[in-house]
Amino acid sequence: MARIGVFVCHCGENISATVDCGKVAETIGNLKHVAYSTEYKYMCSDPGQTLIKDAIKEHNLTGVVVSACSPRMHEPTFRKACAEGGLNPFLCEMANLREHCSWVHEKNELTTEKAIDIVRTQVEKVKLNSALQPIKVPVTKTAMVIGGGIAGIQSALDIANTGHKVIMIERSPSIGGHMSQLSETFPTLDCSQCILTPRMVEVAQHPNITLYTYAEVESVEGFIGNFKVKVRKKAKSLDEKACTGCGLCTTKCPQKKIPNEFEQGMGMRPAIYVPFPQAVPNRPVIDRENCTYYIKGKCKICEIVCPTKAIRFDQPDEILELEIGAIVVATGFDIKHADFFPEYGHGRYKDIIDGLQFERLASASGPTAGVIKRPSDGEIPKNIVFIACAGSRDPAKGIAYCSKICCMYTAKHAMLYKHKVHEGKAHVFYMDIRSGGKNYDEFVRRAIEEDHVNYIRGRVSTVFERDGKLIVKGVDTLLGAQQVEIVADMVVLATAGVASSGAEDLAQKLHVSYDSHKFFAEAHPKLKPVETNTAGIFLAGACQNPKDIPDAVSQASGAAVKVAALFSQSELTREPLVAIVNRTSPPTYSTCVGCFMCQSVCPYQAIEREEFKARDGKVVKTVAKINEGLCQGCGTCVALCRSKSIDLLGYSNTQVYAEVVALLNEY
Amino acid sequence: MKFGIYPGCSLTGSARDYNESVFAIAEAFGLEFTQIPDWNCCGATAAHNLNKELSLALPARILALAEKNGLEEIIVPCAACYSRLVVTQHELKKDPELKNRICEVIEMDYRGTSVILNVIEWIDKYIIPKLEEKIVKPFNHKVACYYGCLLVRPDKILNYDRAEDPQTLDIVMSKIGAAPVDYPFKTECCGAGLSISRTDIVSKLSGKIIEDAEHRGAEAIIVACPMCHSNLDMRRPDINKYWKAKYKIPVIFVTQAIGLAIGLPAEKVGLKRHFVEVKIS
Amino acid sequence: MSHSEHHTERNTLAGSVEKSVEVQAHKCYQCGKCTAGCPVADEMDLPPSMVMRLLQTEEPANDERILRSHAIWLCVTCEMCLSRCPMEIDIPSMMDYLRQRARKEKKVNKKAKNIIAFHKSFLNSIRFTGRLYELGLILDYKRQSLNMTQDISLAPKMISRGKLHLFPTMIKGTAHIARIFKKTRT
Amino acid sequence: MDNLILRAKELLENKTVQVVIGYEAGPTGVVRPAFISDPANADSLIYDERCVQNLAVYLTKPEVKHLGRIAIVSSLPVMRSIMMLISEQQISYDEIVVLGISADGVLLDIADLSVMQGYIDKSDLSNPVKYKELLAELKKLTPAEKFEYWQKELSKCIKCYACRQACPMCYCTRCTVEVNQPQWISVQSNAHGNMEWHILRAMHLAGRCISCGECGRACPVGIPCHLLTMHLTDQVYNYFKVYAGTSEKMNSVMSTYEPNDKESFIV
Amino acid sequence: MSDFEPKIVAFVCNWCTYAGADLTGTSRIKYASNVKIIRFPCTGRIDFMLLLKAFSNGADGIIVSGCHPNDCHYTSGNFHAKRRWIMFKELMDFMGIDMSRITFSWVSAAEGARWAEVVNTTVTRIRELGPYVSYKELVNKSVEEEVKNG
């Protein structure tokens, strides 16, 4: 038999000025099952809360309705008070008499009547509430960071420094990502490698970080605090412990004509190689697709020359099975190859290059040792054209969005060129200069004012070669749309930033949403930019959208804090307001028929399959099961379920039905 | 299946050379086509400049006549006519209401079922498979393949070659032994419909196209459009006057080049009708 | 109500361009790529990107400038602008519309007289014969443009090469063609 | 229909299937479903214009499932039902052999799921013509006339649930009407409860109804309840450009969405 | 009908419209007291049967409101709800059931004034329509039948 206690708050005069609180308490007090009904000036005050605690004991209450302000304001307060009074906190409901009644209506009988209806509705609801226990999920305090670029490095170091274990996975042979390819960084023009390499080394040496390079995620199962991740460690054909990194093998390898990925194809590398001198780990791998031994069955020169006998031709891929509590995705971005733009001639003419190629040309460690030389003949270009938005903001042929980083790096490129080729002329074709950021616009202005980079507002229509020169046909829209033709020695395309190859595949493995451009999707565009819609998986850096280094690093630290907060408790406690699929005795097991339409509506991948087997092991029924670690309690599945086999704790079918009936019927 | 041909007006007049070469190589390859009976002018630039409905109705009549005569595939050698016919087919497919209105205007049924081929598509489909064995005199020349506008644009409607740096004509030419040069003016406009009313503009634009081809060492400009041909060939005196130059590079239809390669005499493919003398063979 | 329904019908040139040829002027973000690649932009009083910008203002005075411009008549419909426009704005169709509108409102630029004379002669030629009669076209154009000496050397050369017929070819369906012209009010 | 009989015999004889579900003429000449497990009985199979019942309804019945692998005579609605049942994980294509029958009564060679998919893809999936006409008539009525029409029709309902029994998509082992906590729909047959039942049924079939019309045929009192689901089938196509039973993947409109779904009534 | 006070139930989501209605309160914007709110976590949770239950229990009008598209706290609940309401409305229209008695709206947590406006326009409209007699009759008839049949 339900025994409900009702506490009507005056909220000073906020409620009592328009609602006759005494009448509300009295009317409600007369309802069946209401064991106690009272009014008080400030329910949220200490004496007010004590009133509730005492009444629970004194009247042996089975449910409490606090009729006061919005539950969005004080629900936690009163639920806690109930718990302290010995009542399960989920047996407490609030009737919103202030925001939804006293503040929005005039003082009259109708307002008081409405207040009574509101309270009565909550009384009917609370009668059907059940005592719920917070959901506790154990947490494995090891994080996985996928991707070893600057965002992954930052996140891994931040997590590791809070004392938790981190496993970092990087698919290429070295960490460092795109940042390791950059020459200088805007807006300070400090050397990218100089600031990055110490961090790379720190990752390798950190006692809390385990680094797996040349490794990729194979599969992910489980949920927040309890992921099971399979990682494929691709064979490096090398005993990493035996190898000293002397580099003899790489110099002796007879195959030396493989386009160097790190140099964006502007240099060559051998088949056994370390991607770049500062690589971490500084150990070679054999690129089996291009290795003479793997292609023709003989060579083995590296094995012969290796002083420590570290080469392992028959090494298989290794599958690691890891228990992970939280995942940070930091897989970065790629640049869109410009060959979708035939009018810009990228790929057809050697001296038309993309932004990353220019970075390598300008880099002191690059193929030209930092001298800007054009690829076709090694001449120093006297006249150079930079084309911004080469692919960005171009729904027709490229991508619709703004890649965000190109305005800044183009300004940087033009500046670097001017610093290296003083007598040269640099032109930038642009549409808008997007230089929001600390010291960013000043940087662009410097390029224009001090380095005299010629900014031309307009797009380029076409670029073609004639007599070894590149003819750039553009327009200056600020001169009344006048055509401009520049005879250039080299053209640099600020190609768009796009999702990393394989991002879609990884997102599917992680059950994380991604947008139409294959970038990982955040849980909320404003308030949850670091979280994904799958609890326990966080985003860092350009895997979410193109970002510059400061943004990527900030987000990476943000993701690290989210992980640290998760790891700060040994168990995860969650509100138990989750969906539940009913269970009945065999042979039905559940009224669920297993159509799994609920699975398709669930935004959190919280709906799993549960199989019931007969004694002979044969599956006799498959039904839906909610993973309460993942369910966020939206209830969309509940409304969809035709057999009414799913219900939502706290907003159950019987509860909301009772509310409708109570609200409309007077007793 | 019956193949139809829509020659268009220029092929019966100023582009007789083109017409002769199309028929000559067709004959050489044993291909026959039926002219769409009682065909009319497609309306060209004039119609769509002045009257949209007319610019759809004239081509629609042609297509309806083709359908009526059971011509499922029509070759349209003139790039301008080709463009008008394909665009009309597209517009009427997109908008059934407009289609009904146009049917009313032309007083005929129109379903839009005919397949329209431009000259290169036709060559690709019917000539190329049998070409190699017939070549007796490879066309060993450096050439600049000039596509013009209407063969490739609007690419989303024509759905033929890509609009930038197209390749189909280059491929056909290399198959008969020619060496196409890298030619950025492939799809630049020659001035087209302004030939008579603004000869100065045509001279300017066509001059640039010719100059670049000569500059790159091409021995001939290869075209597949009678309008381009007349601007680059017949207008050569105007062009040379405008640019104070003496451009001599001949302008040859792709069908003429194929004709020469398979051993047809120059007269047979209309080369003697050119204004700019064709010395290569 | 969804946001898209708030639009009221706009009584501007941009509005009618959108209605008749589905070209949304406001899609243009003024990158100028159309102008950059336009073969006749340097001859134009209003390069294509400027036409787009003027349309966007939806100011009567600017609408007037467009309709009275020489540029819309110089456009050769080469479609280069459309094929390179990042927003796939169909400028050529828009130009067709603007030309027809300019004629309807009798706002044709004086310098475009010859261009229109040519188009009219062209259509006259097919109106009566069904096909283009090139000699007739040239003669009619000379009459309309009063440009008697133009191309005087071209015709004899053409005739000598068999490229110019002295008499028109009449198709059987000339009456049919005439009706098409009449129904489309040409 | 000799081909059908031959094929059925072959499947039974070589034990590819244990039972063939098709149609036969009963002793009084009334067409009824046939469950044939002996090849010798396959001769009784018929297929003509009288064979309209949607046989897919049997595929989810435990007593039929127990018989073993099933071959099923399938017109377009049956094939679409099968597709729906696969997408909702009620059956697997491996459990059945589809004896497809084209619109003009010819036996189709449905070698695998992709062939069936292909056949469905090229078929007209809109509501059958005769129903289209009825729907159009009804839509012309004023709201009051519509209300009156349906009240009159639904007042006949005796809550026998034959509509539910006949529908291949109504395979739930417990229907909402059998839930009493809360009692969503009154057990008795009355004007209000009848209406709510039919609304519920139609809504639960929105985006799932494959327009076979079986519910209407099954109704003993002649309520055109199939028009309710078919109307929604029309609307599903209008709004979302999809038809039910066209994919083995879950693509039901009620469990998917597009961010730019259009409506005109939400303020 | 001047003294007719319609009974209106509002089914709203917790994160947008409920919060928006809270803001109406904190902004002290007044609106008609006929509307009473039932809180749901998300519009996706709102079963169409509840709307029918509201009518059968005597509601003269209903408001259903949640987060604007793309703003759903759970990312997609309102999109699913939207499809559900599209179908529901089409079915109701087809059966001659008066959908002008239901207001569907998107009201965000920041739109306090808008909530008041949605409520007031709904109340005004329902007042004009009068009590939902036809539905009530339907229910009453059924109750009578039940009584008669025991």
Image (cartoon, coloured by chain):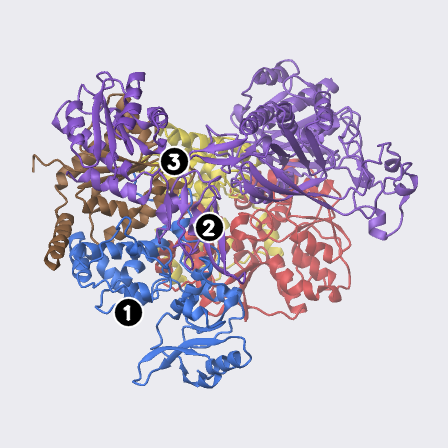
Chain colours: A purple, B red, C yellow, D blue, E brown
Label 2, label 3: how far apart the Cα atoms are: 30 Å
**Relative to C155, A276 lies left or right:** right
Instruction: State whether residue D216 is above or below residue A596.
Output: below
Q: Which residue is mark 2?
A: C122
Q: Are marks 2 and 3 on the same chain?
A: yes
Quarter of image, res B32? bottom right
Q: Count of labels shown? A: 3
Q: Are marks 1 and 3 on the same chain?
A: no
Q: Position of residue B27 (x, y in %)?
A: 65, 69
Regarding mark 2 in the picture, which secondary structure is present there?
A: helix
The residue sitting at 31% across, 60% down in the picture is: D230
Label 1 CA crowd tier, 10 Å (few <14, some 14–19, many 20+): some
**What amino acid is at disc 2?**
Phe
Label 1, label 3: how far apart the Cα atoms are: 56 Å
Q: Which residue is mark 3?
A: C14
Front one among E62 and A257: E62
**Relative to B37, A450 lies left or right:** right
Label 1, label 2: how far apart the Cα atoms are: 67 Å
Front one among A511 and A393: A511
